[in-house]
Image (cartoon, rainbow, N blue to C red):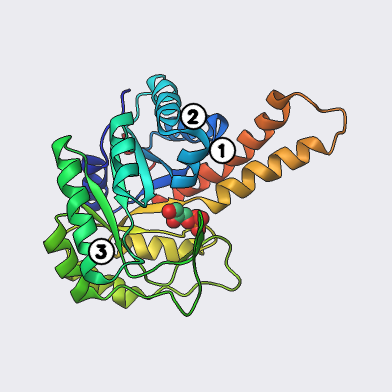
Amino acid sequence: MSLVTSREMLESARREGYAVPAFNVENMEMIQAVLATAAELYSPVILQTTPSTLKYAGADLMKVMVTEVAQAYSIPVTLHLDHGNSIDLVIKALRAGFTSIMIDGSPLPFSENIALTQKVVQIAKVVDIPVEAELGKVGGKEDNVEVNDEEAVYTDPLKAKEFVASTGIHSLAIAIGTAHGFYKGEPKLDFSRLEKIRNEVEACLVLHGASGVPDAAVQKAIKLGICKVNFATELRAAMTRGVREALKDEHTFDPKVYLSLGKKAVQEIVKKKILLCGSDHRV
Ligand code: 13P
């Protein structure tokens, strides 16, 4: 199937009370692993790439690989720019054919975040692509951006209302206690904040930093209104674990052999996360 935007996908999820999992992919094997597993489970799925992945592989190549692999399956697939950090990159992704965009102005002051997001919404509207933005600061490290515990700022529900109304975004990434990367202790999510945000805004709500969050907490967040959940670290770690395992045999030298083991490890994680989000058998 050809790529679709995240608009209908997220709205169906919100209506029916599940979440669409969004998986960060960095190479062909991760793309194959995510799409084969999503197809096996009849799940809609979002594949996303950060600025550093686009620097590594290029937006056009990522789009071609995702499109080619997706053709083989009949599930809805979205290709999303994760944590877009400039107008230039947004335009590059749109020109390449990405079907969903995030602009992350969360490090900026509120009014500047609004101004940047408004510009991106205006640009994306020309090609009818929905935009995700972030308010508050999700902790941890994603790409080269690190937010330490003191700098992490939870999303204010009333500011979220103002932000969504002034920008016209389709989805909003909120900070309620999750962080990108590995957790040192067990994350505690602020569910009452999530409920308040849900009551204030119409936009679809996105949970970043879901690797390592206990299943029960992810499920509760979905029940309270999260309709997109981002997973990156656990997939990267699985890919690496599989490859490391394969390379224990010092006679292994064929990339097809060790990358296949990495792929298999990614598939196992993807399966668990699809079932956790309740997005299986929704197609
Ligand atoms: P994790 O690395 O914690 O899974 O977070 C992923 C994410 O939010 C990507 O935007």
Instruction: From the viewer's side, name the closer residue of 150 and 115.
Output: 115
Q: CA distance from mark 3 to mark 1?
A: 36 Å
* Circle number at residue 267: 1
Q: CA distance from mark 2 to mark 3?
A: 37 Å
The answer to whether residue 244 is left or right of residue 53 is: right
SS for callout 3: helix
Under mark 1, the amino acid is: Gln
Mark 3 and 1 residues: CB-CB less than 8 Å, in contact?
no
SS for callout 2: helix
Q: Nearer the viewer, mark 3 or mark 1?
A: 3
Packing grade of label 2 (10 A; few <14, some 14-19, many >=20) is some
Instruction: Establish if 155 lies above or below 77.
Output: below
Residue 27: x percent and y percent?
Answer: 54, 34
Packing grade of label 3 (10 A; few <14, some 14-19, many >=20) is many
Q: Residue furthest left?
A: 165
* Label 3 sits on residue: 113
Residue 186: x percent and y percent?
Answer: 55, 72
Is the CB of the residue bearing disc 3 within 8 angstroms of ligand 1?
A: no
Q: Quadrant of the C terminus?
A: top left
Under mark 3, the amino acid is: Asn
